Image: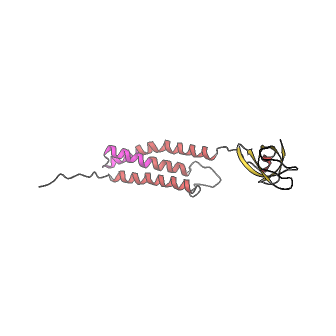
């Protein structure tokens, strides 16, 4: 007696090839994220029309979009595969454009300058370890909105909890302070 046999649906060759193309797009994107300048098209200092992110977006959207269309059409013929490729291209062009725009915006984003020792002068803070007259104590000040703990010298002893004002930056990690 024969039992019911489960049928396995075979993926069309075109769909399989489109999935490989989509996977290549994901691989290019991963490589561009982990090794930012591993693949660069054109001169390194020129932001050309084709970025790695745009290529990755195009390949991924084309491959996966065409695979979806090919499966929806039951693409077993050359005509169906061609229509699936057109559908993949229709998805890939705006995706590549958007990827290029977003990556360019991220690269050209303005950021605040890195604080330097000159930014310490004028900062107000508190003494966290007593500052002796002939040695170093510790103070906590805010620089660029971030709390920073620094070594501090003073002309006269300053007790814990006293408010201080940074008069001079002696180094990147030490300051000369006065009571506030």
Q: What residue do we see at 36% from left, 50% from top?
A: 15
Q: Position of residue 60 (x, y in %)?
A: 46, 49
Q: Which residue lies most toward the left here?
A: 1
Q: What residue do we see at 44% from left, 45% from top?
A: 89
28 relative position to 76: left or right: right
Q: Position of residue 36 (x, y in %)?
A: 58, 55
State which quadrant residue 84 falls in.
top left
Q: How many marks?
A: 0
Q: Position of residue 5 (x, y in %)?
A: 20, 53
Tell me, yes or no, if residue 28 can be seen here. yes
Q: What residue do we see at 71% from left, 46% from top?
A: 147
- Residue 13 vs 88, above or below: the answer is below
Tell me, yes or no, if residue 114 can be seen here. no
User: Magenta segment: does it hold 105?
Assistant: no
State which quadrant residue 20 falls in.
bottom left
In-front residue for pair 61/167:
167
Q: What residue do we see at 49% from left, 43% from top?
A: 95
Q: Main secondary structure of the magenta part?
A: helix
58 relative position to 101: left or right: left
Q: Position of residue 17 (x, y in %)?
A: 38, 54
User: Magenta segment: does it hold 64?
Assistant: yes
The N terminus - image quarter:
bottom left
In-front residue for pair 167/131:
131
Q: Which residue lies most toward the right here?
A: 155
What residue span does the magenta drawing correspond to? 62-86
30 relative position to 131: left or right: left
């Amino acid at each position: 007696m024969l039992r019911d046999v489960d049928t396995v649906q075979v993926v069309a060759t075109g769909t399989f090839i489109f999935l490989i193309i989509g996977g290549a797009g994901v691989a290019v994107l991963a490589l561009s994220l982990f090794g930012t300048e591993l693949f660069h098209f054109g001169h390194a200092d020129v932001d050309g029309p084709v970025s790695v992110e745009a290529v990755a977006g195009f390949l991924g959207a084309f491959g996966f979009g065409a695979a979806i269309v090919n499966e929806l059409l039951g693409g077993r013929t050359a005509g169906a595969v061609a229509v699936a490729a057109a559908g993949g291209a229709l998805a890939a062009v705006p995706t590549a454009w958007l990827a290029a725009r977003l990556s360019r915006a991220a690269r050209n984003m303005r950021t605040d300058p890195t604080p330097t020792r000159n930014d310490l002068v004028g900062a107000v803070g508190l003494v966290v370890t007593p500052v002796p007259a002939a040695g170093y104590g510790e103070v906590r000040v805010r620089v660029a909105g971030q709390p920073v703990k620094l070594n501090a010298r003073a002309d006269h002893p300053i007790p814990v909890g006293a408010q201080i004002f940074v008069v001079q930056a002696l180094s990147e990690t030490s300051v000369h302070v006065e009571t506030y």
